[in-house]
Amino acid sequence: MLILGIETSCDETGIAIYDSDTGFIEHSLHSQIAMHKEYGGIVPELASRDHIKRILPMITDVLTKAKKTKHDIDAIAYTKGPGLMGPLLIGGCVAKSLALGWNIPAIGVHHMEGHLLIPMLGNTEIQFPFVGLLVSGGHTMLVEATDYGSYKVLGESVDDAAGEAFDKVANMLGLDYPGGPAIQKHAQSGNPKRFRFPRPMTNRPGLDFSFSGLKTHTLNAIADCKKNANFNDQSIADIAYAFEIAVVDTLTIKCKRALEATGCSRLVIAGGVSANTRLRESLVQATAKLNAKVIYAPVDLCTDNGAMIAYAGYYRLRNNIKDDSPTEINPQPRWPMDSISY
Ligand code: KG4
Ligand code: ZN
């Protein structure tokens, strides 16, 4: 079965084809980062216009690269939410129009379910139960996944998402967006002994997260350096390290807790922040001590992409879930993860 996946929840147009028989993925991604850069954040209207401009040529391009035609496609999966209303509407409109014209089903996919399942690409069957750590620019949560569509939220951020904290701290340090890769790079030459930042909400029970206090702590460290006239490259690297390791330790402590609380022996990490090398290393070590296994996607499939939507769409279709109406477009800018049903 061939599924065309369309991702347009935010500032990336992602198109992919997933072949369920061979596991083959052909995908193409356009990031709008450069376009939004001069505004210091994503401008939803510009994002929408850019998706409109790129989406059809990219679909044609992916079909050509995969040596397929529209007649080979069995279903179209698209991001139904959560995300920005305009971009979601565009992906939804294109997906449903093509599906209607090609006489195939359209499948609305939850963006975070796409992130959660894509690390399992290449496994013939996804094995439940597992604990999922979802860490992206918009979400930080721990879920217990017991079946397709059965995701119990165990804990989440009460303020900033982990990726958002990376982006804001990078901005304070004068580093480029997206902040995660920039902080990871600078942290490599950081002195681990110079600063120790707090590990928020780890000294009390529970699986929720909070990153805004850590952000303020980081801002104060930057202000101190500036006051003492030593805000130089080494200080940037030292602060980047202290921030990164504080986030990594915090996420690791909570993942261990979630594995112990649920009795699961598999931890799936997903979303843009799961590309972080130090986080991966830390979780590999922590899970080994619990006789558990950590599973993550290749770096290029951690951040937003069309492959994760095609892949999650395949599992929805296999469970006989598809859009009821061929014409109704019903984006869900806010869509709680635990209300996805199969
Ligand atoms: O999943 P994603 O592409 O988009 C959302 O759904 O939000 O995640 C983007 C986030 C950004 O905040 C970015 O800074 C972060 O993922 N990120 C990273 C790394 N690569 C991307 N954070 C830490 N380390 C990285 N290597
Ligand atoms: Zn995402």
Image (cartoon, rainbow, N blue to C red):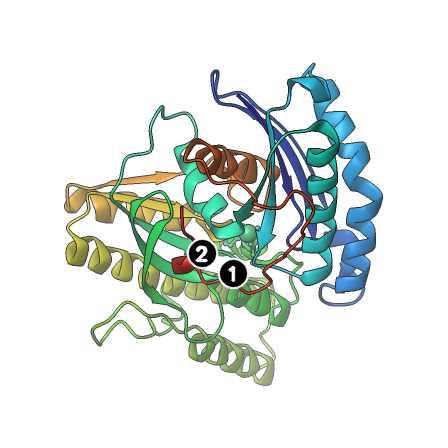
Please report contact status of discs 1 and 2: CB closer than 8 Å, yes or no.
Answer: yes
At 72% across and 63% down in the image, what residue appears? 42
Q: Does any portion of residue 188 appear in the rendered image?
A: no
Report the residue that reaches farthest toward the bottom: 227
Indicate if the residue with disc 1 has its beta carbon within 8 Å of ligand 1: yes
Instruction: List x then y, in percent, for residue 156.
Output: 38, 67
At 71% across and 35% down in the image, what residue appears? 100
Indicate which disc, 1 or 2, sits on the residue closer to the N terminus: 2
Report the residue that reaches farthest toward the front: 325
Q: Is residue 293 left or right of residue 221?
A: left
For the residue pair 202 and 222, the one nearer the viewer reads as: 202
For the residue pair 285 and 305, the one nearer the viewer reads as: 305
Instruction: List x then y, in percent, for residue 287.
Output: 22, 46
Q: Is residue 42 left or right of residue 118?
A: right
* Residue at mark 1 to residue at mark 2: CA–CA distance: 7 Å
Query: Disc 2 on helix, strand or loop?
Result: strand
Residue type at the position of mark 2: Val
Instruction: List x then y, in percent, for residue 174.
Output: 66, 67
Indicate if the residue with disc 2 has its beta carbon within 8 Å of ligand 1: yes
Query: Disc 1 on helix, strand or loop?
Result: helix
Circle 2 packing at 10 Å, graded few (<14), some (14-19), many (20+), is: many
Judging by the rendered image, the residue that carries numbered circle 1 is: 163
Judging by the rendered image, the residue that carries numbered circle 2 is: 135
